[in-house]
Image: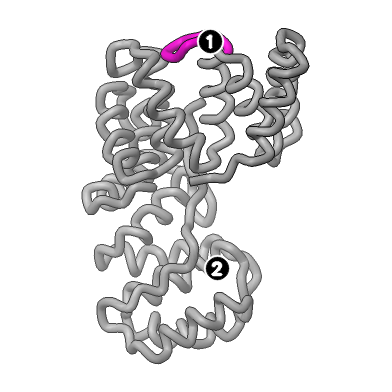
Amino acid sequence: MLKRILAGVVLALMLTGGAVAGPFEDASAAHERGDYAAALRLLRPLAEQGDADAQFNLGFLYAKGEGVPQDHAEAVKWYRLAAEQGNASAQHDLGFLYAKGEGVPQDHAEAVKWYRLAAEQGNAQAQNDLGASYVNGEGVPQDYAEAVKWYRLAAEQGNAFAQSNLGSMHEIGHGVPQDYAEAVKWYRLAAEQGDADAQVNLGSMYLMGQGVPQDYVQAHMWFNLAAARYSEAKDQDRAAKARDFVASKMTPEQLAEAQRQAREWKPK
């Protein structure tokens, strides 16, 4: 399943640029303990002085509604100030708000503009989202080969969403020759990080014996893990139905082994 990742990251509070270390450290500590109002109070003067990292993080607080009422227009204001100074995280998140039409009129071309600026700096989230823009033909002409290029750059940095998306491109044969073994490789990397879509897709590959030997135990385990990780009821139901279908083909011993492996599984 091809998808965009959610905007925003854990509050970065990078001690770079013109920021004074003390207030940044204090803001970071405040955010970590959930005192968002204090983080906001410490960040605002730095942001108003033009510090790009503070501007990005202040925008993030407005986008998430942490310490202030959620206000996407205010988030856009601070993201833009940081993005125009070259802050890659702000460029990505500003692009995301344009893509969603939150705080600004929806504008996929403008989203792509900011994704590209961040992606060219190596921001993995932006690389993934730029790839998705090429897949969906949003803001750019549809171009699967270009999508694969950006997905791969993000996937090689360990971005689970991009790894899952790159696996899908290899499974379908969009932008690359169809290659089930390569699809399995990328699905596995994402699934092992806990990406539920990748877990479902990897389970399907084991069920069908595509790119790997058919293995009901592995298929059941991955479907089971995905069903537990999904937050949306419809996705949980889809994974659970796949798991139960595989279970109908398994011996009691195989089922017990699959359940054991699921219990003991931990993300890497």
- Give the residue pinned by disc 1: 214
Secondary structure at badge 1 equals loop
Judge whether residue 137 can be spotted in this image: no
- Give the residue pinned by disc 2: 62
C-alpha gap between disc 2 and disc 1 = 48 Å
User: Which region shows up in magenta?
Assistant: 207-214
* Residue 257, above or below 58: above
| x 33%, y 23%: residue | 142
Disc 1 crowd rating (10 Å Cα; few below 14, some 14-19, many 20+) is some
Report the side of 243 relative to 2 (left or right): right
Report the side of 109 relative to 191 (left or right): left
| x 51%, y 35%: residue | 191
| x 38%, y 85%: residue | 46
Q: Farthest residue in the left direction?
A: 120
Q: Position of residue 21 (x, y in %)?
A: 35, 87
Dot 2 or dot 1, earlier in sequence: 2
Q: How is the image coloured?
A: one colour
- Kindly identify the amino acid type of the residue bearing the numbered disc 1: Gln
Q: Position of residue 104 (x, y in %)?
A: 48, 53
Which of 155 and 243 lies nearest the eye of the viewer? 243
Judge whether residue 229 can be spotted in this image: yes
Which of 140 and 244 lies nearest the eye of the viewer? 244
Q: Position of residue 120 (x, y in %)?
A: 22, 48
Of badges 2 and 1, the one in the foreground is 1
Which of 101 and 65 lies nearest the eye of the viewer? 65
Q: Position of residue 236 (x, y in %)?
A: 72, 31
Q: How many marks?
A: 2
Disc 2 crowd rating (10 Å Cα; few below 14, some 14-19, many 20+) is many
- Kindly identify the amino acid type of the residue bearing the numbered disc 2: Tyr
Based on the picture, tell me whether residue 208 belongs to the magenta stretch. yes
